[in-house]
């Protein structure tokens, strides 16, 4: 789990592999922890490399893996 409260900003990516098992040490990115701990398989999320995205690091978002500002509540 991340100790970060604010979002992680990414740009220039055409896709990411998002963790769904919630065990990744690099959440919201998959680090293959699901092989050790069990749980959901990662999901590939297609992105527009021309856009900037805010990814959640606090686990509170309801729009995983994207930040919805829940860390401010």
Image (tube, rainbow, N blue to C red):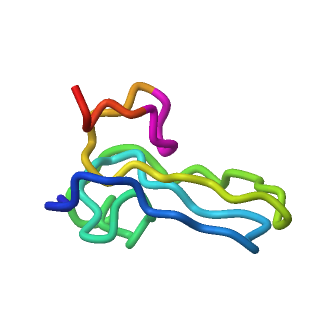
- Kindly indicate the quadrant of the structure image that contains residue 69: top left
Left-right relation of 10 to 22: right
Left or right side of 11 for 3: left
Residue at (43% x, 65% y) in the render: 30
Q: Residue at x 68, y 69 (%)?
A: 11
Foreground residue among 9 and 22: 9
Q: Position of residue 55 (x, y in %)?
A: 48, 53
Residue closer to the observer: 5 or 38:
5
- Quadrant housing the N terminus: bottom left
> Is residue 64 part of the magenta span, yes or no?
yes
- The span picked out in magenta is 63-68
Tell me which corner region of the image, top left, top right, bottom left or bottom right, holds residue 37: bottom left
Q: Position of residue 60 (x, y in %)?
A: 27, 34
12 is within the stretch colored magenta: no
Magenta stretch, main secondary structure class: loop
Give the left or right position of residue 26, taking residue 55 as reference: left
- Identity of the residue furthest to the front in this view: 72
Image position, residue 53 (x, y; %): 62, 54
x, y percentage for residue 66?
A: 51, 43
Q: Is residue 44 left or right of 2 when viewed as pictured?
A: right
């Amino acid at each position: 789990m991340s100790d970060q409260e604010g979002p992680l900003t990414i740009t220039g990516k055409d896709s990411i592999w998002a963790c769904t098992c919630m065990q990744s040490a690099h959440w919201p990115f998959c680090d293959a922890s699901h092989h050790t701990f069990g749980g959901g398989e990662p999901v590939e999320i297609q992105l527009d490399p021309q856009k900037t995205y805010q990814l959640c690091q606090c686990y509170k978002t309801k729009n995983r893996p994207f930040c919805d500002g829940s860390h401010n509540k």
